Amino acid sequence: MVKELKGAFVLCIDVELAWGMVHRNRIDLTEVKRVSINTRRVFEAVIHLLEKYHIPVTWSITGHLLLDHCDRDTKDQLPHPEMPRPSYSWLKDDWYRYDPCTNIQKDPAWYGKDIVDRIVHYLETSKIAHDIGCHSFSHQLFGDQGCSKELARAEIKKCIELMEKHYGITPKIFTFPRDYVGHIDVLREHGFLAFRDIPTKLYPCLKLERTISNYVKTYFSLFIQLLSYYFLFPPHVVASREAVPDLWALPGCLAYGKKPLIPLRLVTFKAKQGIKKAIKEKKIFSMYTHLHSFGENKRMLSNFEELLLSASRKRDEGELEVKTMTDLVRGLRDAW
């Protein structure tokens, strides 16, 4: 039996830029470019806060961002013809339809090698033990039935190959795009230690099929979650579990950032509630955000600092552990 003597705080920052939006029918390309440029401008401020409060992070990186350019196939003009395509019932066009197949100077929202270079350099020079995680190559939805095992393997393999080629890093943590979990056997094949599991929500709906049922479930879920913020309900706190032998699952508890109709102050308050609840129940508060959120919302940095300050104080008082996903899972595994 695992004994968790203290509450724990785990922070993950997903690095995906425009690739987090490829499932949408329409993208404001001007806006995503603006946000990607702002993200680069505030990056140093983000890592300054992590250093100031000594907060380790699992940086979960989408593989395409490790490129500084890409080209269309000369024969059929498809981007990345070597990659399998999904067969999502709700997707009419090619998955890579938004990929500009240019370079980082022209389309910085789709290429991020400069950002990943800065992250890796920061990890190599920081005294804090951070993680690098895999967030697939092109943000495919692993839990959708239109994502085949062949596609899941190709997405993971491509991302790992790029990380090993450019940085000599083999990631051990996987975070599913949109938290849509699927093909965990493929994770085992590639030696992952853990993955971020489906967040515990009051009424979840992850499906993107355009049906009346899914629309009703989605908007009802959003409405219930909206009420949970305004009625100041604390988030769920969780325990890690061994999903299959040697592969651990850690559910997300809160996606931190800008939300429709919810002030960021309420999201920050809820996150601080999560830390207190984890301490009280001796469980884990697993929070994740997106790097581009700092380039999207000017208030993110000040609210984020308030949250990190709260976590660091509780850690310094001996009530809270602040760990990466790798350190947490290894500690739990060794306790069995």
Image (cartoon, grey):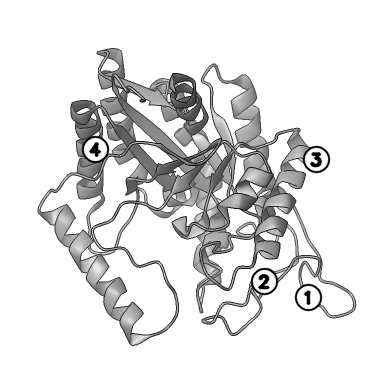
Whole-number angstrom distance, CA of label 3 to CA of label 1? 24 Å
Determine crowd level at label 3: few under 14, some 14-19, many 20+ residues with C-alpha closer than 10 A.
few
- Residue 10 placement, left or right of 224: right
Nearer the viewer's eye, disc 2 or disc 4? 4
Badge 3 element = helix
* First of labels 2, 1 by sequence position: 1
Type of residue at label 3?
Answer: Lys
Mark 4 or mark 3, earlier in chain: 3
Indicate the amino acid at tag 2: Tyr
The residue located at (28%, 56%) in the rendering is 201
Nearest to N terminus: mark 3 or mark 2: 2
Question: Percent x, y for residue 132?
Answer: 59, 36
Q: Nearer the viewer, residue 96 or 215?
A: 215
Quarter of the image with the C terminus is: top left
Do the residues under discs 3 and 2 have CB atoms within 8 angstroms? no
Neighbours of disc 1 within 10 Å: few (<14), some (14-19), many (20+): some
Q: Locate residue 193, reporting x and y percent.
A: 57, 36
Residue that label 2 marks: 96
Mark 4 is on which residue type?
Gly
Q: Residue at x 64, y 32 (%)?
A: 120
**Which disc, if any, is residue 274?**
4
**Which of pointers 2 and 4 lies earlier in the amino acid sequence?**
2
Q: Classify residue 300 as left or right of residue 273.
A: right
Q: Which residue is mark 1?
A: 78
Among the two numbered marks 3 and 1 on one chain, the one whose residue lies closer to the N terminus: 1
**Quick one: 91 or 41, which is closer to the camera?**
91
Residue situated furthest right in the rendering: 75
* Residue 226: image location, x then y, percent: 20, 61
